[in-house]
Amino acid sequence: MTTPAQDAPLVFPSVAFRPVRLLVICAVLTSAAIIASAAAGPYVMFGVFFGIGLALGLLNAVLVQRSVESITAGDHPLKRKMALNSATRLLVISVIGLTIAILFRPLGLGVLFGLALFQVLLVLSTALPVWKKIRTGDPDADVIASPGAASSADEAPKD
């Protein structure tokens, strides 16, 4: 007998998530967006809204980390609980972003651009260390080995 997907245990790879590094990158990008939008004319608020979008993305990422930690800390973490948590969090952040975009249009659209760019930053900041670890087999890369993971260069898959 097999376990239904919604009742299957959660298994997450362990990777290095560095919210402070992302915060610094977001601050630099926000500053650059404000300077660029101010130089383009009366569009300073686009840069501000862009920074708000980056901040919402960072908030979402930190909340994801906390929810994964709390859900997987239980004896029997379920996918259903994680899915409901994710859906609720994404709904709230989307409503906030869209509300700002609509109320302050057209400059408020910067929030959506900030949210989108943050997702790219998040993927890159977590995928690049993993890719580096896989390619080099370097145990000092920014990846935390999960139990049962390959720990030597001989065991790591190569392209």
Image: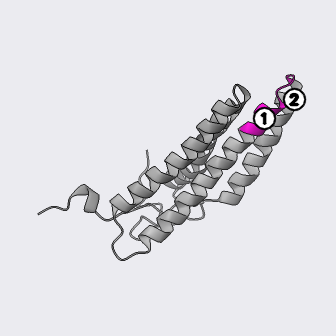
Residue 134 spot, x, y in % from top left: 49, 53
- Which of the 4 image quarters holds residue 10? bottom left
Q: Is residue 77 left or right of residue 107?
A: left
Can residue 66 be seen here?
A: yes
Q: Is residue 46 magenta?
A: yes
Q: Is residue 52 above or below residue 72?
A: above
What label sits on residue 158 in the rendered view?
Answer: none
Q: Could you tell me residue 70's position as x and y percent?
A: 48, 70
Q: Position of residue 89 (x, y in %)?
A: 51, 53
Identify which residue is drawn at 61% across, 50% down.
125
At label 1, counting other C-alpha atoms closer than 10 Å, the crowd grade (few under 14, some 14-19, many 20 or more) is: many
Label 1 sits on residue: 47
Contact between labelled residues 2 and 1, with CB atoms less than 8 Å apart: yes
Tell which residue pokes out farthest to the top in this image. 41
Q: Is residue 95 magenta?
A: no
Q: Where does label 2 land, which residue?
A: 38
Residue sitting at x 64%, y 48%: 56
Q: Quadrant of the N terminus?
A: bottom left
For label 2, the SS is helix
- Which corner quadrant of the image does residue 115 belong to? top right
- 16 or 153, nearer to the observer: 16
Name the main secondary structure of what is drawn in magenta.
helix
Taking the spot 78% from the left edge, 39% from the top edge, the residue there is 48
Q: Amino acid at mark 2?
A: Ala
**Residue at the extreme left:** 1
